[in-house]
Amino acid sequence: MKRIVLLFGICLFAFSCKNQQNIVVAKTYQEPQDPNPTKNEDWLLISNALQASIASTNIRFLRSEVPKITPQNSWSGTAWKGERISLQLVLWSTDSLTKVNTKISDFKSDKGQIISSENATINFVKYVITDEFGEGCGYRKPEDFASSLAADVLEPVSSYAIKARETRPVWVTIEIPQNATAGSYQSTFTLHIEGQKSKQFQLNLKVVDRVLPVATDWKFHLDLWQNPYAVSRYHNVKPWSPEHIALLKPLMKRLADAGQKVITVSLNKRPWGGQTFDQFEAMIEWKKKKNGTWEYDYSIFDTWVQMMMDLGIKKQISCYSMVPWGNEFYYFDENENKEIKISAAPGTPAYEALWIPFLEQFKAHLEQKGWNTITRIAMDERGPEEMKAMLQLLNRYAPEFGVSFADNHKSYKLYPNDLKDMSVAFGHPVDAGDLLQRRANDYVSTHYVCCTDSFPNTFTFSPPAEGVFIGWYTMAADFDGFLRWAYNSWTENPLQDSRFRAWPAGDTYIVYPNNQTSIRFETLREGIQDAEKIRILRAHFAENKMTTELDQLNTIVQKFDRTSKPENLEKLLREAKNELNILAENKF
């Protein structure tokens, strides 16, 4: 008997030691100090153990505050085959340091099918300094705007050290394989806590018998402008070196996997003046030779475009700009042996002398590469007079290019046959007849948001649901897609401080260095997925003459044809998504 008791004691001790084992947490970078920490006495009410709960993906938790939520230990989600779905947990502790390790099990159905846990990515959410909308656009001093920490950066690590009186979200993304079997699946998310009992959460996943195509086949026209020069500066590598290309590829692959359709090219340097921390250099070298002729080196242009195409971004090349801010242009002059900056407004002799030889040679180069039919001369919010003079020249020498234009002047009315890719400011709708005619001509019509829009937006302080709303609004307003001016025009220290000198925080970028995604990017992508699902169902219902279902779908979508923020956006989206997935189960 004593021997049995002794063995039981040894086993109990071994189990206890196993449960108390040291957890080695992943290495990660240091977050910024909270510029405005709250003194929250609610921490005094928290027991001395790690707290954890499933939470809404629309909540940006404050690092210094106790989460104001009703604890939940289960999650339920519905997704199509090929879709990415996200969930959020939140951890908080009043103790000193608490080390945690996370693990997610395979998703198993009651019929024995398995979706591997390798399809799930666990991210600890990290904080970055943000500010507030204020008056939107306009140069700003940091001290004039309330600053705080925003939960946004997704750090792909599965372990972390939670500090005392700290709230730490965890973001999980699940990629449903396209060949998954439809049905109901269950998984367990486990928190192993050093010195404490583990916590478990049940994950319930319903897979609908519909397939979302791979992102490169989505019809949604996504145009997030890329800045490769920010990558070289941040990582301190030579632009266009092998090291630079190696850093660019995964970052741009992430963009391709969100359905990006457009390659951003800078024909000449500084097409937008100095509106970014890292200025855009010329991807084509302009050289005026001693005999007065022009020579162009396309090496960087070709490398960049081909790399992006190889990643799956190959519908359009947008070249900035024949009408840059300030009408300033740069080239190397052999006679003077230096770079020359000139000012040449559209319609002037100097402008024609600069652009006619370029267009003639550029056109020939593009024809040789097979890219001439997908190339657009791109402009950003230029005035009608400048546009008119530029178009006259372009249509004489390279009419097949057409124009890509961020339009806040209703220029599509003035040039209906020239703007092959037009994006209008949010809240400035295009006449329905014009949209139909543009679509019949195979022209692209999108909308954009910028620093003027307090809603919807993707600032670091924006509610995450606004990113999802953008996809639904796109379909409700009958646009082909969405434009945002900055995918990765990083601030000086983008992982620390998202504020910039002229716009609300986060306006200049939506992903982070080291190919780290964000809550903002994931929710924007979620809305784009929803838009694709709407498009697929509309086509299916129309083809099979399912008029009742088509009417139901359109009624759901039209709730999002609005430019003011709904009273409860999260609830509206949740109900619309649920109704969308129910309709998806109607095959015939």
Image (cartoon, rainbow, N blue to C red):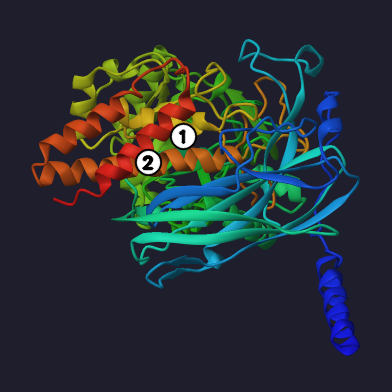
Q: Quadrant of residue 290?
A: top right
Pick the residue in front: 140 or 289. Answer: 140
Say which quadrant the N terminus sits in.
bottom right
Which residue sits furthest left? 545
Task: Name the residue: 55% across, 17% down.
Answer: 454
Give the secondary structure at mark 2.
helix
Dot 1 and dot 2 residues touching (CB under 8 Å): yes
* Residue nearest the viewer, comparing 558 with 29: 558
Q: Is residue 440 left or right of residue 566?
A: left
In this rendering, the answer to whether 371 lies above or below 184 is above
Query: In this orientation, which residue lies closer to the viewer: 341 or 128?
Result: 128
State whether residue 369 is above or below residue 2.
above
Q: Position of residue 574 (x, y in %)?
A: 42, 34
The residue where tag 1 is placed is: 468
* Residue furthest front as drawn: 1
Tell me where residue 432 sits by quadrant: top left
Residue 185 image position (x, y, % from top left): 44, 61
- In this orientation, does residue 201 appear? yes
Specify the amino acid type for callout 1: Val
What residue is pinned by disc 2?
530
Question: Quick one: 268 or 276, which is closer to the camera?
Answer: 276
Instruction: Classify residue 293 as left or right of residue 509.
Output: left
Label 1 – label 2 distance at C-alpha: 8 Å
Please state if 29 lies on the left or on the right of 333 as rendered. Answer: right
